[in-house]
Image: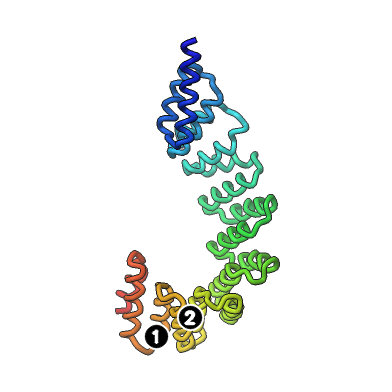
Amino acid sequence: RLESTNETVLTYLMISHEKNHEWKDAIRCGEELLEINPDNYSIKCRLIDCHFNLREYEKSLYYINELDCKKLRYKKGMVLFHLKRYGEAIEELKNVKTLEAYKLISKSYENLKKPQKAIMYLTKAYEKDPNTEILFEISEISFKYGFHTHSISILEEVLMEDPKNEKALEKIARNYLELQKFELVIMYCEELLKVNEGNFNAYILLSETYPYLDDNYKALELAEKGLKINPESAELWVQKAWAIYPFDFEEFVKCYEHAMKLEPNNTENYTKLIWFC
């Protein structure tokens, strides 16, 4: 009877600690409960979560393996992902076939530098839950690995549903900049400014584009327009610096120095300024 009373008290204590996010105290209660009843499935499941919340993934995995339950496949996959055992995480998650599992498989493949596989599983996630954010994730991976045409086609799907989506218009313009299709960059940026004339990212892209068309004066004009909207944009100050570089080296240096004050941890700006000085 005393053991039963202790078990009840410890159970309530564990619940209380969990509610207060006192994971270490909850674990202590859980471990004492397992001394009373080593086969307590519920307590082991809760210990998995407590250790996970403390980022003690190996300990979570210990209890998951001890229980060896199909219901814990997603949790096991998540733990293996956090342990950077991406291949094992993928194998565990392939049988789960939920939206969350497909997303985690995609992240695992991306960490393994396998972008096509990452995109494939995000597409499966989109089939489960057709929402715009998943399309943006697909386009971002495509952009990162240089699949710009694919990235654009995905973003065009977003525009079919929402022709004024600023994020999609901006990202299409960025893809065209990478493809050096400058007239299309300008076209999408102008469309973006029609939707929101205060979108300073459009001015960043335009001021970066016009020098490729041998029009630094236009680039400078657009950088200055953008800075009127957002004078704290280090990127716009850098674009202004490059636009003015052929005409006024001192002003080029001043613009770069201003950008570095805004982003003191951006070592790329320091490196470029030292190189050109």
Q: Position of residue 112 (x, y in %)?
A: 52, 50
Relative side of 102 to 60, left or right: right
Q: Position of residue 36 (x, y in %)?
A: 47, 16
28 versus 49 height, above or below: above
Q: Tag on residue 207?
A: 2
Q: Residues within 10 Å of mark 2 (few under 14, many from 20)?
A: many
Residue ranking furthest to the top: 1
- Give the tally of numbered discs: 2
221 versus 199 height, above or below: below
Q: Secondary structure at mark 1?
A: helix
Residue 39's image quarter? top right
Q: Tag on residue 122?
A: none
Q: Residue at x 62, y 69 (%)?
A: 165
Image quadrant in which the C terminus is located: bottom left
Q: Tag on residue 244?
A: 1
Give the amino acid type for the residue marked by disc 2 in the picture: Ser
207 versus 140 height, above or below: below
Give the amino acid type for the residue marked by disc 1 in the picture: Ile
134 versus 86 height, above or below: below
